[in-house]
């Protein structure tokens, strides 16, 4: 027969009993979703200082049209890719990529307007 102290863990529970999992896959998905929402929102807001600076200085020479065009294309195609791989459903990730594409398009438009 085992001594009592060999059959209980440090909390007094049975040894080798299943322990509750605090960080389950479901909780991970919730945390990941909120992190995505936070950083995607910050990303959208992060375009504003660039737009403001270009407008205030009335000079867009320091910004690459090719770079902004590439980012616009990347966001649009990512939105389309997500839409297709999500059963042609519109979800938060598709929306965020479309908003980012809009901000890239606004920046690109401002750059080109100031160069014409």
Image (tube, helix red, strand yellow):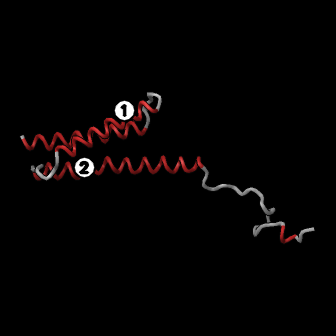
Q: Position of residue 50 (x, y in %)?
A: 21, 51
Any mark on residue 22, and which?
none
Q: Position of residue 71 (x, y in %)?
A: 27, 43
Tell which residue pokes out farthest to the left in this image. 116
Q: CA distance from mark 2 to mark 1?
A: 24 Å
Q: Nearer the viewer, mark 2 or mark 1?
A: 1
Residue sitting at 60 percent across and 55 percent down?
A: 23
How many residues crowd around disc 1 within 10 Å: few (fewer than 14), some, or many (20 or more)? Answer: some
The image shows residue 79, relative to residue 57, as above or below, that is above
Q: Quadrant of the C terminus?
A: top left
- Residue 13 is left or right of residue 75, and the answer is right
| Callout 1 secondary element | helix
Any mark on residue 48, and which?
2
Q: Position of residue 2 (x, y in %)?
A: 89, 69
Q: Nearer the viewer, residue 23 or 78?
A: 78
The residue identified by callout 1 is 80
């Amino acid at each position: 027969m085992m001594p009592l102290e060999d059959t209980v863990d440090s909390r007094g529970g049975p040894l080798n009993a299943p322990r509750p999992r605090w960080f389950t896959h479901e909780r991970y998905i919730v945390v990941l979703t909120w992190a995505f929402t936070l950083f995607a929102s910050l990303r959208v807001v992060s375009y504003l200082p660039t737009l403001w600076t270009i407008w205030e200085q009335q000079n867009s020479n320091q910004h690459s049209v090719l770079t902004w065009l590439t980012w616009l294309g990347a966001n649009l195609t990512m939105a389309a890719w997500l839409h297709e791989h999500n059963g042609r459903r519109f979800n938060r990730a598709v929306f965020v990529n479309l908003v980012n594409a809009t901000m890239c398009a606004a920046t690109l438009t401002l750059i080109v307007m100031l160069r014409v």
